[in-house]
Image (spheres, rainbow, N blue to C red):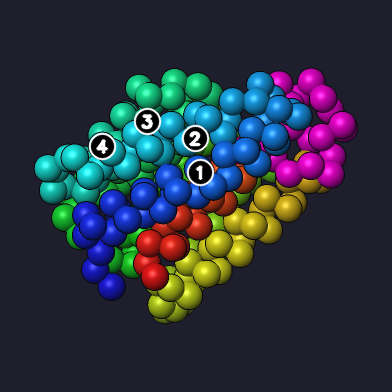
Amino acid sequence: MSLGKEYLQQAIAACSALMEENKQYLIDLDSALGDGDLGLTMTAGFAEASSFINGSSETDLGKLIMQMGMAISRKVPSTMGTLVASGFMGAGKALKGKEALDDADIAAFFEAFVQGVMNRGKAAPGDRTLVDGIHPAAEALKGAISAGKSLQDAFAEAVAAAKDGVERTKQMLPKFGRAAYYGEQVLGKEDQGAVVGSLIITGFSKALA
């Protein structure tokens, strides 16, 4: 499958819509374990991303994604905004020079997104962060595509892996941010950053439909 700029526009629009739909949920999660602004920052960040990508004439998709990441960083320079922006900038760097994306490129996009987040935040899988929602999704996507499955089926597996990753954060102790102060009080609650990761992979999946 060959995907162009229109797919990226639709994917970011879907992510933006999901952040808006889940704004109060993210606010509530973040209010319990953080500073309560996550729903607002993600809604604003992805609205800005959608506006940027729709208004850009850039045809190099890697450059476009990098520039979009920078636009998110400028709009929402919070911890999560910076991490999400770093993910997109890492993904864009990996795809520089591409004017269309095949299935392997999509897998590379999310693999590089995860690496960008980990490089910026110094977090690893199991640290109860954004990584725990998006890393299992990226691994599932890569594995399914490598096995010759369709991109639709690969995304279905990735979305399921992300949701499972979010669920598993309920048993993880946080190492970063305000949540770290709560210690074992967070057990039984999903990590708000991991939820953001799950919503991102879900948005990219919805855009294929």
Please identify, in this view, whether the residue under mark 1 or under mark 3 is nearer the observer. Answer: 1
Marks 1 and 3, the one that precedes in the sequence: 1
| Residue 127, position as x, y percentages in the image | 69, 37
Mark 4, Cα crowd under 10 Å, few <14 / some 14-19 / many 20+, is some
Q: CB of mark 2 within 8 Å of CB of mark 3?
A: no
Left or right: where does residue 74 sit relative to residue 57?
Answer: right
Give the residue drawn at x 43%, y 24%.
76
Kindly identify the amino acid type of the residue bearing the numbered disc 2: Met
Circle 2 sits on which residue? 42
Q: From mark 1 to mark 3, how far is it between C-alphas?
A: 14 Å
| Residue 119 visible somewhere in the drawing | no
Kindly identify the amino acid type of the residue bearing the numbered disc 1: Met
Q: CB of mark 1 within 8 Å of CB of mark 4?
A: no
Marks 4 and 3, the one that precedes in the sequence: 4
Q: CB of mark 1 within 8 Å of CB of mark 2?
A: yes
Kindly identify the amino acid type of the residue bearing the numbered disc 3: Ile
Q: CB of mark 2 within 8 Å of CB of mark 4?
A: no
Is 85 colored magenta in this rendering?
no
Left or right: where does residue 159 sit relative to residue 171?
Answer: left
- Tag on residue 72? 3
Which quarter of the image is occupied by the N terminus?
bottom left
Marks 2 and 3, the one that precedes in the sequence: 2
Q: From mark 4 to mark 3, how far is it between C-alphas?
A: 9 Å
Circle 1 sits on which residue? 19
Marks 1 and 4, the one that precedes in the sequence: 1
Which residue lies most toward the right here? 184
Circle 4 sits on which residue? 52
Q: Secondary structure at mark 4?
A: helix
Q: From mark 1 to mark 2, how far is it between C-alphas?
A: 6 Å
Please provide the residue range marked out in magenta. 173-193
Q: Secondary structure at mark 1?
A: helix
Marks 2 and 4, the one that precedes in the sequence: 2
